């Protein structure tokens, strides 16, 4: 088994688990809205790899959506620049509950190498309540899918204990 085949199998397994968790929690497929809040494009390339290269996540019931009103997860990449912060806030405000915010990449975590720049607010948590940070510069597709699965699994466990669905 080649390294590429092994990696592909891991991603496919994670994608199937993510779809099942979304179906269990939401009773339907999982819709993800991506907002680039000022990134270099590295995280977007890995996100594209996660969604397109390995059996298209749509085959597992996971889709990227343009309309935030139909999204379950707001996935943010980038440094949260002053020019894009309001767009991210408006996107979250348009989402129905339960909803989750996932910051992807080191820049979305805390501003990354751009931390301290005048137009950088310091990551997604500076503008929105974040449920999960997936670190890496950029994080691998497997790490992104695993992180999304972690959000749903943690919320499912909280729901089983009687907590309301969705932190936000």
Image: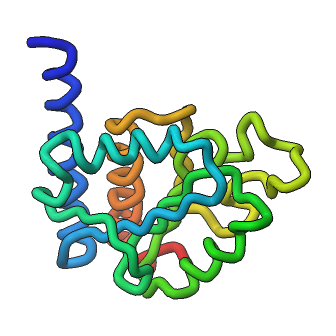
In this rendering, would 3 be left or right of 34?
Answer: left
- Location of residue 63 in the rendering, given as x and y in whole percent from the top left corner: 26, 65
- Between 135 and 36, the residue placed more toward the observer is 36
140 over 24 or under it: above or below? above
Whole-percent x, y for residue 78 in the image: 62, 51
Q: Whole-percent x and y of residue 56?
A: 17, 51
Q: How many discs appear? A: 0
Q: Is residue 40 left or right of residue 162?
A: right
**Residue at 21% over, 48% down:** 15
Quadrant of the image containing the C terminus = bottom right
Nearer to us in this view, 39 or 29: 39
Asked whether, in this view, residue 32 is left or right of residue 105, the answer is left
Residue 91: x and y, percent? 55, 78
Q: Is residue 72 above or below residue 113?
A: below
Q: Is residue 156 visible?
A: yes
Q: Nearer the viewer, residue 66 or 161?
A: 66
Q: Residue at x 34, y 72 (%)?
A: 65
Image-based side of 7 in relation to 35, left or right: left
Residue plotted at (71% across, 38% down): 112
Residue 162 visible at all: no
Q: Quadrant of the N terminus?
A: top left
The extreme top residue here reads: 2
- Please report the residue visible at 62 percent of the width from the left and 48 percent of the height from the top: 39
Coloring applied to the structure: rainbow
């Amino acid at each position: 088994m080649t390294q590429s085949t092994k990696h592909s199998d891991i991603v496919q397994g994670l994608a199937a688990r993510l779809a099942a968790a979304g179906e269990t929690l939401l009773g339907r497929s999982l819709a993800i809205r991506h907002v680039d809040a000022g990134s270099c494009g590295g995280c977007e390339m890995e996100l594209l790899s996660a969604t397109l290269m390995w059996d298209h996540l749509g085959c597992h019931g996971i889709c990227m959506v343009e309309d935030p009103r139909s999204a379950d997860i707001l996935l943010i990449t980038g440094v949260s620049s002053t020019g894009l912060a309001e767009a991210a806030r408006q996107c979250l405000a348009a989402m129905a509950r339960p909803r989750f915010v996932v910051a992807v990449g080191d820049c979305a975590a805390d501003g990354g190498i751009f931390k301290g720049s005048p137009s950088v607010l310091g990551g997604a948590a500076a503008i929105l309540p974040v449920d999960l940070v997936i670190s890496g510069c950029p994080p691998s597709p497997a790490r992104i899918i695993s992180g999304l699965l972690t959000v749903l699994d943690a919320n499912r466990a909280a729901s089983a204990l009687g907590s309301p669905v969705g932190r936000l």
